[in-house]
Amino acid sequence: MIKFPNLRAQVFGVVVGLAALAAAPALAASFDLSPEQPTRIHTDKDDAAVAAIGKDFKFVKDGVLTIATNPWLPPISTYATDAKTVVGFDADLSSLLAESLGRRIEIVPVAWPDWPLGLTSGKYDAVLSNVTVTEARKEKFDFSTYRKDQLGFYVKADSTIASIKEPKDIAGLRVITDSGTNQEQILLTWNKQNVANGLKPVEVQYYDDDAVRSLAIQSGRADVVFSVNSTQAYQAATQGKIKQVGTLSGGWPRTAEVAVTTRKGSGLADALTLAINDLIADGKYAKLLAKWSLSSEAIDKSQSNPLGLTKS
């Protein structure tokens, strides 16, 4: 396994500058990152969802659905061109859920480690921030699923690698992944199986900077990136320099889903689940996924508190 340092020297500055220049026209053409969000999808009040809200549930603010999110990376959640408005798939879905409940949306940006305490202490009504359902989290929170937790294999756009579906497909390849993540665990497990079967080992690479990771793929230093599918799909759509050659559940070998997170027993989860299913039924959910190039992560039905991932 190879660990590459945080390279912030000349090559990093050059790569970042070139990447920004190359991506800017494509971003403007493909994705709306303006604070106004004129292309945002809207919906009507969902009376059935409103009726499903628990009688004892108290919203943080009158007439408002307050949702916390971590603006980390597009297309899931990021800051708009004004550097203060949160936009992306999570913001759009939050808006649709607020409208479904007949309320205005208020999005609260939070750091990822802070959302559990903020939610339990009542700072916001819900969290919508790529939170995967786990059995451990279900002990403290309720969930309403809305998207697959999906990982993706991506290669250079002109790579001869056409498909990665199973362990043998990565034998002998140089694969970039993220340290301390589910994808790293899966990659190491696959590599162990390959070695046991007499196949060539994987060369696992780690990078601290996305720009340097991109350079490694484009220069031929690495063959594959195995990471969060949504962010890689966004890069593929906006820059056209990489392509998807396979996907895998973030909970492999089991499936996993991300969900709107609410306080345990608060009485809001079933209402949100119903609202999401109505959005699925009327087609707005599919349109929203397509808007942010996330159609491959669609679920057929939202569930309240489904079986979650267990500790390995």
Image (cartoon, helix red, strand yellow):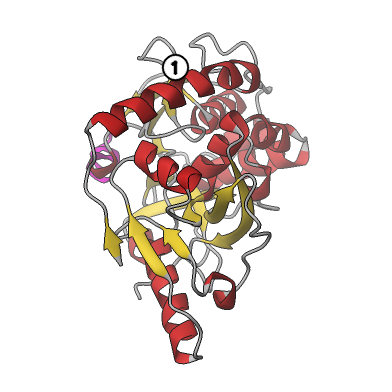
Give residue 277's position: percent from left, percent from top: 67, 44
Q: Position of residue 256 (x, y in %)?
A: 52, 61
Is residue 118 in the magenta section? Answer: yes
Tell me what residue is drawn at x 49 percent, y 27 percent: 91
Residue 62 shows in this picture: yes
| Dominant secondary structure, magenta | helix
Residue 4 x/y as whole percent:
26, 52
The residue at 34%/72% (across/down) is 311
**Would residue 283 be found to the left or right of residue 68 on screen?**
right
Q: Indicate the quadrant where residue 86 lies.
A: top left
Q: Nearer the viewer, residue 187 or 69?
A: 187
Residue tagged 1: 80
**Of the pair 98 and 311, the residue shown nearer to us:** 311
The structure residue drawn at horizontal position 61% and vertical position 28%, both measured from the top left corner, is 100
Residue 65 visible, this angle = no
Tell me where the magenta segment starts and ends, as one range: 114-122
Q: Is residue 290 left or right of 258 when viewed as pictured?
A: right
